[in-house]
Image (cartoon, rainbow, N blue to C red):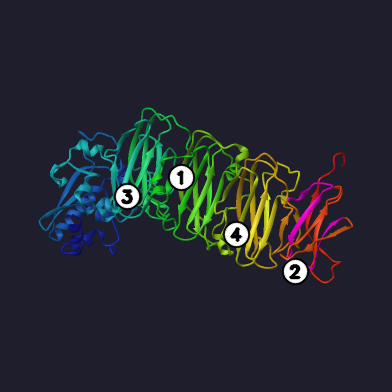
């Protein structure tokens, strides 16, 4: 039938088509809203319609009949019922006088259907106006599609074998012309009235071309179905979970209370925000489902967005199939991993009805790698969460982030405690990834963003191929003061191109280890990545010695490896200091020289003193051995009874 329509446009019926829908001929007959409302004479004859430039449906159909006959085409007027202005879904049309008129034309020995009135535009009854909109869907329409909105008084003009009864026409879902022109197909339900099962109803559509969708759910009111304009901008909705895959849309409806609801589905081409009504339903909910509140989703679609692949998210059947189905956060923890087709930047948002935004930020840790994006989620409350993902190309910093997906999470068991949340001020790039690779930092001994330790100690090594100046910072929640500065809990060793960062934590808790590098000499340090350290050991680890700027590449401390020494004790020192001419320890005015052995290690036994002054390790790099630069500073424990 579709081929016949195309042939009619291209072949011997081109003249008929151009009479009504050739865009060079502006639609000059507008619908007579005043006549329809009974405020003026209803114009139906061709002469009256042409003279006034307006008419109701019978005016269009009579004019169409006369124009066709003028060019030798057999054309019949067909009266019947329509699902247009004044139609209420569910109303019985039995013994009701038909309200519409259209045409059937005989072309090449075959009858075709057309509605010149609906093809010219639609009425806005709210403003009592006619909206001109060329819609050639109603020219030689497939009878299988035409019957969805037009039911003729005479059964033969259905052009169907077998024809459908009036009761079936009344039960069918209301579909607009855009439903068919967009290539949509209704999977379920088959009738407009849906009764929820356990408080839930489902609507499913398939489509042949990429499309975007939205929906509207309202408490049912007996108003004119087409009383408002057909066009609708993309807007927010509640009480539904929508999932759009490559070829289908599923809408899970969850009415909030007992009652009857009107559901309208809107659609449009992919990446548009101006959508049109395509179909509508009525949902009856005898008993709503008792469930926890689902967070608002301003992006409507759950799961990956239809545009996700074009944004650089590689097709992931596991993620796509999740859709509106809630993923369980086992013991309050969830991990989302999205494969990418190119390097992307990502920002995530976590929403829960009872969760403050400041706390929500401490529930997320993201790792950005060239081919995968990982979001680690903590759930401090029971219930449903919305995890939204926003991406852009990594290098295109001027481009705005776009929503790539929204995932429904559910936490029903153990939750994460307040002291278990991620540290404040966590970077958007945790763990090694795209940024560290671009800076030439590679071969990390730990490739994940989250680290757990039961001993309170941890080391990470990596290669610094560009010989960048490295800086590290250790932090935790601000309201937990430390007896020893956290800067003394870090120690860096840099040999050749290999960097080792050692950590000794003071007590149990969650810490942030920030890694920074000076990309351009003379500029400030740039953040490279953060590690999240979760320590379960309550015993404090010993601090490291404090290091000064003279502690540089090639310097290696072999002994002692702690920064807090016993008082009145002999301590063995072993250290490598490239290029040093003299290495000494200093306690006040007392200097002790270390000796250089055959392995190029400076070593010696040093008395720690009574703890009244720190011990400093220093080196002279020139012939003037009286001038030394401090490398490391060691604290000495206080003698008992001393202050």
At numbered mark 2, what does the secondary structure look like: helix, strand or loop? Answer: loop
Name the residue tied to disc 2.
579
* Residue that badge 3 annotates: 122
Disc tally is 4
Which residue reaches farthest right?
Answer: 589
In the image, the segment drawn in magenta is 562-587
Q: Where does residue 555 sit, x and y in percent of width and height?
A: 71, 62
Q: Is residue 489 above or below residue 171?
A: below
Q: Is label 1 in a helix, a strand or a loop?
A: strand
Marks 4 and 2, how far apart at CA: 24 Å
Residue at the location (38% across, 31% down)? 199
The foreground one among 449 and 102 is 449
Task: Looking at this view, name the residue that lies furthest to the top.
Answer: 287
Viewer-side label of 4, 2: 2
- Judged left or right of residue 440, residue 26 is left
Question: In the visual, does 609 lie left or right of 118?
Answer: right
- Which callout, 4 or 1, points to the residue nearer the camera? 4
**Horizontally, is 287 left or right of 157 in the view?**
right
Front of the two marks 4 and 3: 4
**Picture quarter with the C terminus:** top right
Q: Nearer the viewer, residue 413 or 24?
A: 413
Q: How far, Cα to Cα, is label 3 from label 2? A: 88 Å
Measured from the top left, where is residue 525 in percent x and y?
67, 61
In the picture, the disc for residue 407 is: 1
Question: Could you say where residue 380 lies in the image, as x and y percent from the top left?
Answer: 56, 37
What residue is shown with label 4? 462
Give the number of the mark in front: 1 or 2.
2
């Amino acid at each position: 039938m579709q081929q016949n329509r195309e042939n009619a446009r291209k072949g011997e019926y081109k003249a008929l088509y151009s009479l009504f829908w050739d865009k060079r001929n502006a639609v000059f007959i507008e619908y007579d809203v005043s006549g329809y409302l009974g405020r003026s004479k209803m114009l139906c004859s061709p002469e009256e319609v042409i003279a006034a430039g307006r008419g109701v449906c019978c005016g269009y159909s009579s004019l169409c009949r006369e124009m066709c006959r003028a060019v030798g085409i057999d054309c019949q007027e067909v009266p019947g019922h329509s699902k247009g202005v004044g139609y209420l879904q569910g109303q019985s049309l039995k013994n009701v006088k038909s309200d519409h008129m259209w045409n059937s034309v005989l072309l090449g020995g075959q009858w075709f259907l057309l509605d010149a009135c609906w093809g010219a535009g639609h009425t806005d009854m709210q403003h009592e106006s006619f909206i001109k909109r060329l819609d050639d869907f109603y020219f030689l329409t497939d009878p299988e599609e035409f019957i969805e909105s037009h039911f003729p008084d005479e059964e033969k003009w259905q052009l169907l074998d077998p024809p459908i009864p009036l009761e079936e026409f009344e039960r069918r879902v209301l579909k607009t012309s855009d439903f068919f022109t967009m290539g949509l197909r209704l999977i379920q339900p088959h009738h407009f009235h849906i009764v929820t099962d356990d408080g839930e109803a489902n609507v499913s559509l398939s489509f042949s071309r990429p499309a975007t969708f939205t929906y509207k759910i309202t408490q049912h009111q007996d108003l004119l179905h087409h009383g408002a304009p057909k066009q609708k901008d993309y807007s927010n909705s509640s009480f539904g979970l929508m999932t759009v895959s490559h070829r289908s849309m599923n809408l899970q409806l969850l009415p909030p209370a007992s009652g009857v609801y009107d559901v309208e589905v809107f659609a449009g081409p992919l990446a548009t925000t101006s959508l049109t009504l395509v179909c509508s339903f009525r949902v009856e909910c005898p008993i709503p489902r008792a469930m926890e509140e689902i967070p608002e989703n301003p992006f409507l679609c759950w799961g990956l967005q239809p545009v996700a692949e074009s944004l650089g998210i590689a097709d992931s059947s596991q993620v796509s199939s999740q859709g509106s189905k809630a993923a369980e956060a086992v013991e309050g923890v969830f991990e989302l991993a999205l494969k990418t087709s190119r390097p992307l930047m990502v920002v995530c948002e976590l929403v829960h009805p009872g969760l403050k935004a400041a706390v929500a930020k401490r529930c997320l840790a993201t790792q950005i790698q060239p081919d995968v994006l990982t979001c680690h989620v903590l759930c401090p409350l029971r219930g449903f969460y919305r995890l939204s993902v926003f991406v852009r190309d990594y290098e295109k910093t001027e481009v705005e982030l776009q929503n790539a997906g929204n995932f429904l999470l559910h936490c029903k068991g153990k939750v994460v405690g307040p002291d278990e949340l991620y540290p404040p001020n966590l970077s958007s790039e945790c763990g090694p990834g795209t940024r560290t690779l671009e800076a030439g930092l590679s071969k990390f001994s730990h490739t994940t963003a989250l680290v757990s330790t039961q001993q309170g100690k941890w080391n990470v090594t990596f290669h610094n191929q560009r010989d960048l100046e490295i800086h590290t910072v250790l932090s935790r929640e601000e309201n937990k003061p430390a007896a020893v500065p956290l800067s003394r809990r870090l120690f860096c060793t840099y040999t050749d191109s290999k960097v080792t960062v050692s950590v000794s934590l003071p007590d149990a808790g969650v810490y942030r280890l920030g890694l920074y590098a000076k990309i351009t000499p003379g500029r400030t340090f740039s953040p490279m990545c953060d590690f999240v350290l979760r320590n379960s050991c309550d015993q404090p680890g010993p601090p490291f010695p404090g290091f000064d700027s003279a502690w540089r590449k090639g310097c290696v401390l072999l002994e002692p490896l702690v920064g807090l020494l016993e008082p009145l004790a002999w301590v063995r020192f072993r250290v490598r200091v490239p290029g040093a001419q003299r290495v000494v320890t200093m306690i006040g005015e007392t200097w002790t020289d270390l000796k250089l052995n055959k392995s190029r290690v400076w070593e010696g036994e040093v008395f720690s003193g009574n703890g009244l002054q720190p011990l400093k390790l220093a080196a002279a790099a020139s012939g003037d051995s009286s001038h030394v630069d401090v490398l490391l500073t060691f604290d000495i424990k206080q003698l008992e009874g001393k202050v």
